[in-house]
Image (cartoon, rainbow, N blue to C red):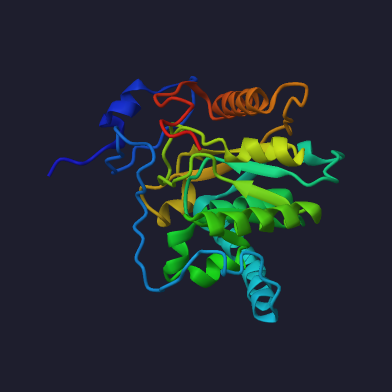
Amino acid sequence: MERISCLDGEKYKELKVKEGVYVPDLAVNFPDDDPSRRMVKVEVVRDLKFDETYPYLDESSDYKRNVFLCDLKTYLCNFLNWMIYGLKIENKHVLDGKDFSNGAITVANHQYRWDVPGVRKAVGYRRLWIPAWADTFKTSDYFNLRGARCIPIPENMGGIKKFNEAFDILHERKEWFHIFPEGVRWDFYKPFKPFRKGAFNWAYKYDMPIIPMVYVHRERTGWRKLFAKGEPLMTLKVLEPMYADKSLPRKAAVDKLRKEVYEKMLDAAGIIHNPWPMIPEVDN
């Protein structure tokens, strides 16, 4: 049987990268028609409602215990990140000496199951709160997601109001947020999918800097060839913080910041021509 190769896909054929940039040859048929399609299957095992009654910001002792245990688990995940994916973090020093007294928003391309622990390692002692698809909380990952400070994005107005109130409170506490602007995870996918504007809206609303981070791939070498065959090694690049231009009207400032962050991230990823547009068809 002929081997499947992502490089045969329409979008990969359009992709152009800088000389020397590694593009992993994955045995995956990625979608070429819908960048919002979710490739990670959701298997529902819990019946939960994400409306105005859901505790988006949970202060219970059980929740705090779960968070503590998940924080410990993050250290294990990052040990495995190093062992299996050879995770390297570059340019972490760009965060040194910066004023983050009002919090910050990290953004990254959504690459693999353990990409959040990598971002957590990059920001050090800071806590990250993460908006996430509500239906993933109905899976066996419920406690992991809750413990990782993920907050479900509800689909009804009552829930949205409470969700927004939760992040308003977190901002008052000067907490940090993390958002994957692509919205969906396609494992080790080289092109960038369109960026939703949520992170950039929040950057303007809360007057918080965006800290772009970019996962790039390296060829699997040495003893790490024993693990995760067919998957690349990973490097996380930390870029300079970027701010919304508050002299502009909100929409113009949000659009400008999204474009600037997107272009900086493409450049850091070594992408000269990206096959997907920057703005999704449904821009929310």
In this view, 273 is above or below 54: above
Q: Position of residue 80 (x, y in %)?
A: 55, 61
Is residue 256 in sight in this rendering? yes
Q: Position of residue 43 (x, y in %)?
A: 34, 65
Is residue 91 in sight in this rendering? no
Left/right of residue 118 with respect to residue 185 in the rendered view: right
- Residue farthest to the left, as pictured: 1
Residue drawn at 56 percent across, 35 percent down? 197
Front-lying residue, 250 or 262: 250
Q: Quadrant of the N terminus?
A: top left
Q: How many marks?
A: 0
- Residue farthest to the bottom, as pictured: 62
Front-lying residue, 55 or 187: 55
In this view, 238 is above or below 244: below
Dividing the picture into quarters, in which one does residue 209 lie?
top right
In this view, 5 is above or below 74: above
Left/right of residue 185 with respect to residue 266 in the rendered view: left
Left/right of residue 150 with respect to residue 32 in the rendered view: right
Front-lying residue, 242 or 115: 242
Residue drawn at 48 percent across, 33 percent down? 283
Residue drawn at 47 percent across, 59 percent down? 134
Dividing the picture into quarters, in which one does residue 203 lie?
top right
In this view, 190 is above or below 63: above
Front-lying residue, 35 or 27: 35
Q: Position of residue 188 (x, y in %)?
A: 43, 43
Q: Position of residue 235 (x, y in %)?
A: 57, 42
